[in-house]
Image (tube, rainbow, N blue to C red):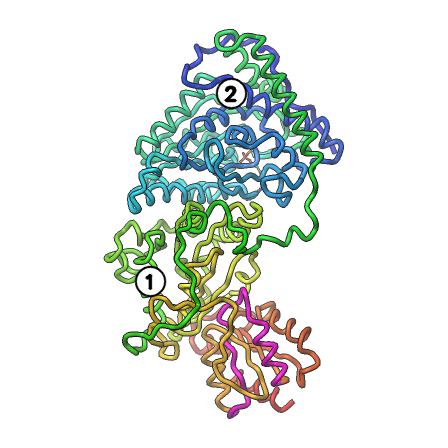
Amino acid sequence: MTVQAAAPRATRSRKPAAATPPPDVDWRTVARIMLTSRALDRVEVDDLVPAGLVKYQFSAGGHELGQVLLGLALDHPRDAAAVYYRSRPFMLTNGLTPEEGLAATMGRVGSPNGGRDIGVVFNLPRRERATILPMSGDVGAQFTPALGWAHAIRYRTTVMGEADWDGAVAVALGGDGACATPGFWAALNMATTARLPYLFFIEDNGYAISVASSFQTPGANIAANLASFRNLLVLDGDGTDPAACAALVDRAIGHIRGGSGPALLRLVVPRLLGHSVQDNQAYKPAELRAREAARDPLPRLRDFLVPEVLTAADWAAVEAEAEAEVAAARDRAAAQAEGRPDDAHAFVFSDAAHPQTVGGTRPEGAGLSVDFGARPNPPEPVRLNLVDTVRMTLEAEMRATQRVLVFGEDVGAKGGVHGATRDMQLRFGADRVSDTALCEEGIIGRAVGLALAGLVPVPELQFRKYADPATEQLNDCGTIRWRTHNRFAAPIVVRIPVGFSPATGDPWHSVCDEVVFAHSVGWKVVFPSDAEDAAGLLRTALRSDDPVYFLEHRALYFGAEARRPYPGDGYMIPFGQAAVRRPGTDLTVVTWGAMVHRAIEAADAFGGAVEVIDLRTLVPWDAESVLTSVRRTGRCLVIHEDHVTAGFGAEVVARVTAEAFEHLDAPVLRVGGADCPVPYNVRMMNGVVPSVAQMRDRMATLLAY
Ligand SMILES: Cc1ncc(C[n+]2csc(CCOP(=O)(O)OP(=O)(O)O)c2C)c(N)n1
């Protein structure tokens, strides 16, 4: 491994001081944190990396000044920031200790992520200044969760009337490369259209690893290109000039706190070391590296402060203090234990005994009660469509708590393309039931930030296929609790219409693909087959402390087979509890969603021989009920609409053969959708979606085995 020299110490630069230091900045603290950050880099590069104790080292050398000034400005108790891997000076300003910083890069138990994540992938419940939202290792993924926090500032101030949120700001820090990501543009569109209190803090060091900024934006200056963007204050300056930098940070934050909407501040900085310690920067001309070294903000700060603010002796004392603190932190961090291998299994899902510190309603004690007790009688035994009980449940929960809010494409005035939110905007207002820009990544990222800020966001994704653009945010949401060692959680309920419609199919609107969701860590997956279950399971989802995929089948929205009376405003069904829809003696059919009704119809041909079990939830799934049934019947058939290859049925089959093998009288079989997209032509569609005839055929084969 090529290891480069650590970032230099603060020797005097040849440049004269730029201006008189503004009096309202605590420059001694700025100096101390910048010197501490440099000392941390040095101890890692010179000592811990060569010793094999630190594997990933990302230096912030050159970026420190703006980050520390920004950190000091985030003094409102409700401020939050989404950071990136070069944000350690900002983290130190927000209360991260040097010992935690080194424990993190060494993967020790005292890391803010308990050794689970790279040491510069940060999170931090509020200490001295901003709450640091759980960071993602995906470049650009920081922008939309911060947007959600900005939305929460607005919502908690105006809808919930909480004055203590007034004036807060949300910030996302990122590099020039990050400005090319979909997350950046998603947040930019949403922050500016809604005029949210949001700061894009862009540290432009000219490179994304080895790729120059000219590849990220034409002319290599994102601020210049955004100059005419509506509803956005755009500021641009030198991130190594103390007075100019302080003035820019002050202006940006003042603009946002004053209610004037979002701002983008681009600071041009040198990257004094490689992208990471492994990067020797061979792609940069020597002359450019020399120019970058000459722009080091640390000697510039020294020149700026000494002697007007600090004497040379003061500066030396601060430097010695930082060095000593880091040396002591190094020893303490190195002495920390490492996690046990099975420690990694904890906190994938919520644990009643160990609540998270930030996110969801639980930390504020604001959640609605969870009660799986007696089912209230419906006032009128009128059978309703599934789509109606979804809406009634949403409305009941929104009446019960202001924390629930619904948003997505067309959910407002139109009431959703499926009618699930029909007239809800009229009843609850446009702050609680709102349309969004056509941007699924933004919809989900925003939901994550809202949940982190204590709200219960219920985003609708218009069709299953259109979850694709949100994949990054969905996957990152599921692992927040685990990645932050249970400090943060973002319990959101994502409603997604799935599957074919009886009128027609097609490759875009008829996708099921629930197995992908079942495979994503940290998510519960709910797939109701009728209107009563939809109400009971949706209420449980809305009161859950984990993120939930709530899959609503298009054929069941208005299908007569799924109609049931509304079971009442208190009705809840626990996750992981299957329902026997039809008892039987000789064959267990395991299924879910729209296939439940086809399976029942097929089973009718065999008298009382076939038992049909509806799983209702796939994560968790009720293996015990299935195994108990199979041990009695001796046969098992799994039916689902999703493609048969690597579908969730394979999971069920694996468990049944592993745990009920001695009871089986026949092989365990599957009926699933064909391994191709769902076609538009209905005759062709019926050759792809499992049919009653196909199911009957398989049932007959197994019963005769
Ligand atoms: C979505 C995604 N793509 C690629 C990467 C790999 N990667 C990590 S950092 C990086 C460069 C980012 O550069 P920039 O945003 O300019 O920040 P800088 O490192 O220069 O501070 C890349 C390509 C990633 N982490 N995430």
Frontmost of labels 2 and 1 is: 2
**Relative to 406, is 614 above or below?**
below
The answer to whether one can see residue 533 in this image is yes
Dot 2 falls on a residue whose secondary structure is helix
Q: Which residue extends farthest right?
A: 51
Q: Quadrant of the N terminus?
A: top right
Q: Position of residue 69 (x, y in %)?
A: 47, 24
Q: Are marks 2 and 1 in contact (CB under 8 Å)?
A: no
Q: Residues within 10 Å of mark 2 (few under 14, many from 20)?
A: some
Q: Position of residue 350 (x, y in %)?
A: 53, 55
Amino acid type for the residue under numbered disc 1: Val
- Magenta region: 606-633
Dot 1 falls on a residue whose secondary structure is loop
Amino acid type for the residue under numbered disc 2: Thr
Q: Which of marks 1 and 2 precedes in the sequence?
A: 2
Picture disc at residue 29: 2
Residue at left offset 58%, top offset 18% = 291
Picture disc at residue 417: 1
**Relative to 525, is 471 above or below?**
above
